[in-house]
Amino acid sequence: MFRNVIRVNRYSIRTEKTYWYWVRFYLRYHKMRHPLEMGPAEVNEFLTWLAVKRNVAAATQNQALNALVFLYAKVLEQPLGDIGEAVRARKSMRIPTVLTHDEAIKIIALLKEPYNLLASLMYGSGLRVVEACRLRLKDIDFERQIITVHSGKGDKDRTTLLPASLIQPLQQRKARIFTAWQAQNPFYQCQVSLPFALKRKYPEASRSVEWQWFFPSLTLCHDDDGAVVRHHLHNSTVQKAVKQAVRQAAIGKPAGCHTFRHTFATELLRRGSDIRTVQTLLGHADVRTTQIYTHVLGQGFAGVQSPLG
């Protein structure tokens, strides 16, 4: 029931996995009682336990609540209503770690292909690691220097910058893929995975060159219908490569893939870009999320200088 309803509502596969994790956790906590036998009081107890005994972050507790609200409202059709005063996990204000431009370039230089290109896209275009991995040949407009991100966080599409320095290496990569596909290289004979109902709507798309991944996985897998398909490079592989490069660079900061995205935003603001433009490029729904980068820059002090000089 849960899987049918969440797919009808077009939630992403990542959200499906996350919500299903919390539904299972909730049921195990209450000794496998059926959710229809429980309600707001049991949800309140579970959320309080997460905050008090498990010491989860506020975002994690909210994630669990969202999953249970979905379960009761959409799947069981019995909305929770008021769950009472659950103990809320404390929300922490964290300033993100950012790199200098030189530090970012130093890390990228230590990466091998295709990881150097992926890191360059995260830094130069502000892409999340999964957004960079998911790029298809049709998603990059070299003439207009635009990258289109499909089904980003919150299932939203957006466009962002294509750095001029990446045009040539990405065009060369695209040309190699096209040549191999045109020559019917066995690597590209397997159909690529497609989202949701596109496979049925466009039955030939999975074998067309436009839908080929820019960064395909070397191994094959099965899609939801059981068909053998080629997926994109897994984001965990990229994260491991970046972590290793960060250690080799010895920059003394706890950096990872998302640090490139933080650095992209910070550098744009430092160079005078409007915060609303940066918000659009990052795909933030609320400008307050983007404003965290002004704290990184130290622009929140209204021109106040230290008495030390």
Image: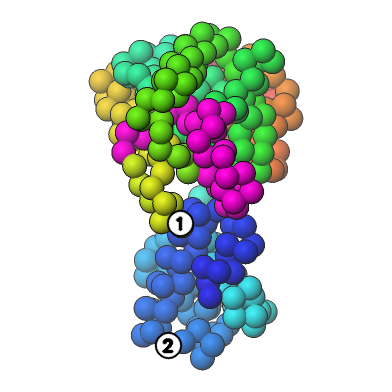
State the residue in front, 90 or 112: 112
**Towards the viewer: 76 or 168:** 168
Percent position (x, y) of residue 129?
46, 34
Q: Which residue is drawn at 50% across and 54% down?
A: 13
Q: Do the residues labelled 1 and 2 touch (CB within 8 Å)?
A: no
**Could you tell which of marks 1 and 2 lies nearer the N-terminus?**
2
Q: Where is residue 29 in the image (x, y as percent from the top left)?
A: 38, 79
Residue type highlighted by circle 1: Asp
Looking at the figure, which quarter contains the C terminus?
top right
Q: Is residue 207 left or right of residue 251?
A: right
Q: Distance between the residues labelled 1 and 2?
A: 29 Å
41 horizontally vs 227: left or right:
right
Q: Which colour scheme is used?
A: rainbow
In the image, the segment drawn in magenta is 194-219
- Left or right: 129 as drawn, with respect to 220: right
Compared with 140, 2 (above or below) is below
Say above or below: 153 vs 108.
Answer: below
Mark 1 lies on residue: 224
Q: Does the magenta stretch include residue 217?
A: yes
Q: Residues within 10 Å of mark 2 (few under 14, many from 20)?
A: few
Q: Which residue in the protein does label 2 denote?
A: 33
